[in-house]
Amino acid sequence: MNRKSFLVLLGLVLALGGAGLALFWQDLAAWRSADAKIGSKLFDKLPVNDVAQIRLIDAKGEVTLTLKDRRWSVKQRGDYNANYQDIGDLLVKLPDLKVVQTENVGAALLPRLNLVQPGKDAKSADGAGTLLELSDKGGKVIGSLLLGKKVIKIEDSPLPIKQEIPVGRYVLSPGNQSVLVISDALKNADANPAQWLAKDFFKAERIKSLTASGEGVQWKIARGEEYGQWKFAASGGQLDASAAVAAVNALASLAFVDVAIDVKAESLEKPRTIVAETFDNLTYTLKLAKKPGSGDYYLAVAIAGDPPRERKPEKGEKPADKERLDKQFADSAKKLGERLKLEKSLAAWTYVVAGKTLEPLLKDRGELIAVPRKPPVSGR
């Protein structure tokens, strides 16, 4: 091989090597670009303070949470108050969501990860995800994400059953073809309106009498003092003390599962009326009726009366105790006044309440009568 041929061959080798090296660095750059998504934040620049509407849509329905006059409400429940804490938790989490994994998944496999856009294809409803949209007060979408299947971690537990803990979630981000796994399961990001309702409810406390009527039922129990013994207001058997306490306690711990926006108190069929009078001069009137096709009940409540503004001195009260007792009364009166403001506003709605929580209030008079104890059988 002469010198000229050698130089030509060397030039070709260098050219091919350079091209290969260029391709190598190009592939490396592409790999680095894809890998850079790991650890990045999906909503790093989200203007959280500008969010005035949150929409969640899935194959079963949707919920729209709206901020107006500094109050969050649930549109699908007639603008009933929304749960501020749940909304706040979601908005706090979003800017810190990190990508922990990326996957190249074909369109045919997206249903398995519940990453099909909801509403686009009825046949793919089983594989539909939950679309999350954030908008400002002008209605402009400032953030969105398609939420898919949760990533579950299996952990050992003292019980024979393994414990499943959601640790992440598959998502699709707008403009990104890759399936991402984020660092939080966002388990409360649900399109069910009932889940987002503020669950603050009334509490009838310090009850002095309780009356039930309707559906062939009529009974009344009462006590003369706050910690006195419960008795039937009219003669007719010995009252079962435990049944009386259960009925009274039920009114201090009721919770609702949903708001029935199309049901009015006056339209309830065959309602049972429960009236509770308290030592605070308040009267709680409840109307209960079965919700068709379920074990739940419709409940409407009205609250009347005003608590006393001044404390009556106790019999034999010492002057040294007056300041302390007056302060206790003032503190309690303030808390009760704040609670009543909310409770009286509840009369505008009809609620869905689980039947099990109402069972102590649904008893007939005969079920409240104490069963006589059988005398012990003497031995031979």
Image: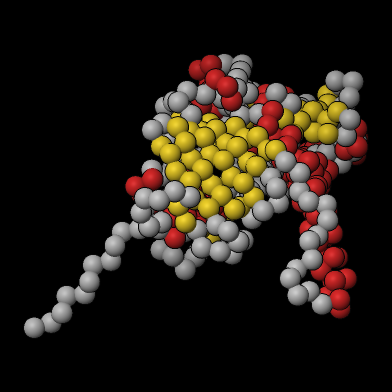
State the count of labels. Answer: 0
Observer-nearest of 217 and 40: 217
Q: Can you say which quadrant of the picture contains the N terminus?
A: top right
Residue at coordinates 86% horizontally, 76% vertically from top-left? Answer: 319
Residue 212 at x, y percent in the picture: 48, 40
Residue 371 at x, y percent in the picture: 31, 59
Residue at coordinates 72% horizontally, 30% vertically from top-left? Answer: 80
Residue 330 at x, y percent in the picture: 84, 59
Q: Which scheme is used to colour this image of the protein?
A: secondary structure
Observer-nearest of 93 and 255: 255
> Eyeballing the image, is 298 above or below 102?
above
Q: Can you say which quadrant of the picture contains the C terminus?
A: bottom left
> Eyeballing the image, is 293 above or below 374?
above
- Residue 286, picture quadrant: top right
Q: On the rendered structure, is 99 left or right of 193?
A: right
Observer-nearest of 208 and 72: 208
Residue at coordinates 51% horizontally, 63% vertically from top-left? Answer: 229
